[in-house]
Image (tube, rainbow, N blue to C red):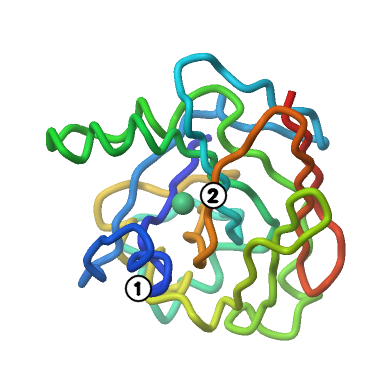
Amino acid sequence: MKIICIGRNYVMHAKELNNPVPEKPVFFMKPETALLLKNRPFFHPDFSKDIHYEVELVFRINKVGKHIQEKFAHTYYDKVAIGIDLTARDIQSECKAKGLPWEVAKAFDSSAPLSEYISVEDIKSVKDVNFSLTKNGEEVQSGNSSEMLFHIDSIIAYVSQFVTLKIGDLIYTGTPAGVGKIAIGDEFEAFIEGKSMLKMRVK
Ligand code: MG
């Protein structure tokens, strides 16, 4: 399986990092080894001094597809979860300055904490999902899927022009504003519609 991540999908987050608002979805990938499941702790690596949390809604692909039309895209996912796109911001800034790919800043082991899934059938609309993240008990990020620049159906239509989607692939749909640095000892908790879904302690 592969993890496809969308960058700059919320206007306020693009602005907080002084990035332009994109005209097409910006995507990159993380490998399967990036997954961090079952509320396991994240062990802070030595290679970065500035790893950021980015809370994101995540969709699970349940059907193989290529060149998927947007109007059919909703039939290609069945589950939603919440994840954190951990990002070595210091390394990413160097990559951006040099015009280099982002993988070294994004694709490292355990950089994709992920919650359990909720069936799409059990939420009222994938275009109206509230989610949030707390750090040491205080809310640091909150968003609603209606604020995405590119909705999940549009993302699937775009990405599947280039990359075949397969069963079990995950799409991290971008983060709202409020990203920030993680530190050893921090405890994060992520919520969908106020329900606790994911915990991550930094060790
Ligand atoms: Mg992200």
Label 1 CA crowd tier, 10 Å (few <14, some 14–19, many 20+): some
Q: Quadrant of residue 89?
A: top left
Q: Work out which quarter of the rendered image holds the C terminus and state it.
A: top right
Residue 88 versus residue 141 in the image, above or below: above
Instruction: Evaluate whether residue 79 shows in this view.
Output: no
Q: Residue 120: which disc? A: none
For residue 69, the mark is 1
Q: Choose between 90 and 176: the one closer to the eye.
A: 90
Query: Splitting the image into 4 quarters, where does residue 119 fall?
Result: bottom right
Badge 2 density bin: few <14, some 14–19, many ≥20, Cα 10 Å: some
Residue at (54% x, 62% y) in the render: 178
Q: Is residue 11 visible?
A: yes
Question: Mark 2 = which residue?
Answer: 180
**Who comes first in sequence, dot 1 or dot 2?**
1
Nearer to us: label 1 or label 2: 2
User: Are the two marked residues, 1 and 2, in contact with CB atoms closer than 8 angstroms?
Assistant: no
Instruction: Tell me if the residue at label 1 has its CB under 8 Å from ligand 1.
Output: no
Residue at 34% over, 57% down: 17
Q: Tell me which amino acid carries mark 1.
A: Gln
Q: Is 136 placed above or below 40 here?
A: below
Disc 1, SS:
loop
What kind of residue is marked 2? Answer: Gly
Indicate left or right for 123 with 126 as reference: right
